[in-house]
Amino acid sequence: MHETPDPAVVAGRIAERRRQLGLSEETLANRAAMAPRYLRVLLEAGPGFDPAGFLRIAAALGSTRAELLSGRADAPPGQGGPGPRPRLLDLTEQECWQLVGSHGIGRIALPGEPAPVVMPVNYVVDQGCFVYRTGEHSATAPEEGAAVSFQVDHLDEYLGRGWSVLALGPARYVADPHELKRLAGLPGAAPWAGGERPRWVRVHPEKVTGRRLVTG
C-alpha cells in the first residue's frame, strides 16, 4: 500500500527546484500551461488533485513526477536534517578499525595543485593498512611516499546518526608479485569503477582517529 505524499513536502521540493533553475512562480505556471493561481491551488491540494498537472510541472522543471513526490533516489546524504540532541563522541583506534571492517568504499585525499584532490575508492584492510587499486596515470595514483589521508564514514539518514574514521600516513606502492596476487584475492578487491587498475597502493596509517555522531 503506497503512502499519500504530504502536499507541503511536495510543494517544498517544487519550490526548491524552481529556485535552483531561477524560475518565478509565474514562469513555472506558464511552462506547465496553467494559470499561476491554479498552480498555487494544485500545490496546496497535492498530487492526487490533478495528476496530469503534476506531470506538466515535473516536465517544466526538468524532473519526473516520482522525484517530486518521493525525492531523488540518488540524492546526496544529509538532506534529512539532524536528529534530536546530537552529540559527537571520540572513537578509540580499535573502535575505528572495527567500524571500517575488512573492505568498503572510502575517500583518498592526495596532494595536488592548486589544491588537494579527494577521490572515492574501494579499499581492503590488510595488515593494519588501507589498500586500494589504481591505474598508472589515474587521479587516485599518488607519488611514492606521498603524505595522504584516507576517510571512511557512514550515515544513517533516518536516525541522524553516523561515524567517520580518518587515517593519516604515507602511501606506497606494492611491488612484490606474491603480495599482489594475495591482495587480488581478498574480498572487496575488485574495483567498482572497472577498467585496468594494475597498481596497488598501501596507505600506512601513522594516526587513526574517528568520531561518532549520536542522538537522543
Image: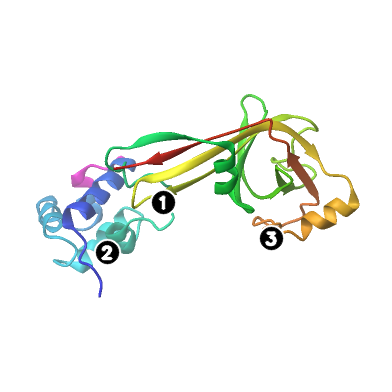
Image-quadrant location for residue 113: top right
- Which sits in the foreground, 161 or 9? 161
Mark with earlier residue (3, 2): 2
Which mark is drawn over residue 55? Answer: 2
**What's under tag 1, amino acid-wise?**
Ala
Residue 168 can be seen in this image: yes
Q: Quadrant of the C terminus?
A: top left
Magenta residues, as a range?
22-27
- Which sits in the foreground, 150 or 68? 150
**What's under tag 2, amino acid-wise?**
Leu
Q: Which residue is mark 1?
A: 75
Mark with earlier residue (1, 2): 2
| CA gap, disc 3 and disc 2 | 45 Å
Left or right: 61, with 105 as reference point: left
Q: Is residue 4 magenta?
A: no
Q: Which residue is mark 3?
A: 187
